[in-house]
Amino acid sequence: MKKTSTRLADGRELVYYDSRDDVVRDTADPRPLHPVATTAEIREDVLLGDRVAVASHRQDRTHLPPPDACPLCPSRDGRHTEIPDSDYDVVVFENRFPSLAGDAGRCEVVCFTSDHDASFADLTEERAALVLEAWTDRTAELAGLPGVEQVFCFENRGAEIGVTLGHPHGQIYGYPFTTPRTALMLRSLEEHAARTGGANLFDDVVARERADGERVVLDTGHWTAFVPYAAHWPYEVHLYPRRRVPDLPALDEAARAEFPRVYLELLRRFDRIFGGGRPPTPYISAWHQAPLRDPRRDAFALHLELFTIRRTSGKLKFLAGSESGMSVFINDVPPEAAARRLREVASGS
């Protein structure tokens, strides 16, 4: 991998990640951009203990432009975009419309490919491995920034999810606090250890799923993917490395080498569960990494959670009264049935 860091016209950082070492990235951004002005601030909900990012400047962000006006495509034929070069492998840059900024954190955009009409599932294993390297490198870089407490790499795909740009891309957030979801996991982890005399909750969950087998979707030499026993979403898969580690930089080489094949297979199955991938299945793919300075960090387990809001062809799972009002999910698809369906649509079946 070759990494080239540069700056856009308004001072935001942009980083090219290339598979080849001989690629030269020296094209300047010629756009007459003003420095990014943000209004991002973090407020605390004192009743729930949650934090809310208030970012009114995001109201003006680009919303579903036509392909010939996509800001994530390379700059070509006299049209200048967020990526100055005429082609790229993987690119990461600071978001022009960040939810978090300055003392309130950092937001980055990750472009997986220059092909506007592709998706992550269309990538080669080599390119998926390069994306993993970019996620890993950015996790390490953001972890070194003052005030960042947790790094979150994720992808939203599909208009139903609410994406504002159709180009295949994801995001990375550097939160200035431990997220509420992670805090709940850490509390459960601590309570389980106290109840069992020191057992690790993540290890026990994965061991239970592998022993039971009914909800396992993929089980390889270095990764295990399963539908959780109490899945919140109609089709939801959790992917864990066999060797527990707190974050992406801690993955060993064997797990890194196997990840592209495993992850691409999961994404392609998601595209097939509702009839061949047309229209593509909307999903959220989220890496859960340990907070950077929590004393329970080494007991946390890096894992990826992949889920879709589609419950059947043409029908979405909406967060209605119980889910939105009380955070009590109601799932119409039994996890065992979801796992069975995801096994049925395996490549080559």
Image (cartoon, rainbow, N blue to C red):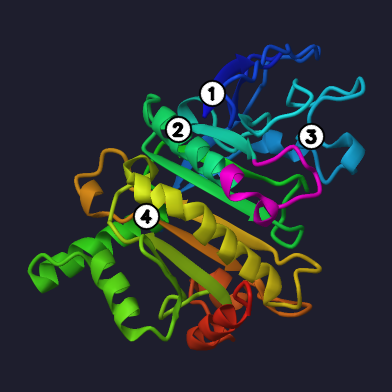
Question: Taking the image as drawn, is residue 50 in sight?
Answer: no
Q: Residue 112's quadrant in the figure?
A: top right
Do callouts 1 and 2 mark residues in contact (Cβ within 8 Å)? Answer: yes
Mark 1 → mark 3, Cα distance in angstroms: 19 Å
Q: Which residue is mark 1?
A: 3
Mark drawn on residue 182:
4
Q: Residues within 10 Å of mark 2 (few under 14, many from 20)?
A: some
Mark before the other along the chain sequence, 1 or 2 = 1
The three-letter code of the residue at mark 4 reads Thr
Nearer the viewer's eye, disc 2 or disc 4? 2
Q: Earlier in the sequence, mark 3 or mark 4?
A: 3
Q: Which one is in front in this view, the residue at disc 1 or the one at disc 3?
A: 1
The type of residue carrying mark 2 is Asp
Residue 54 point in image, percent of width and height: 58, 40
Q: Circle 3 is placed at which residue position?
A: 73
Quadrant in the picture for residue 321 = bottom right
Task: Confirm whether residue 11 shows in the render.
Answer: yes
- Mark sitting earlier along the chain (4/1): 1
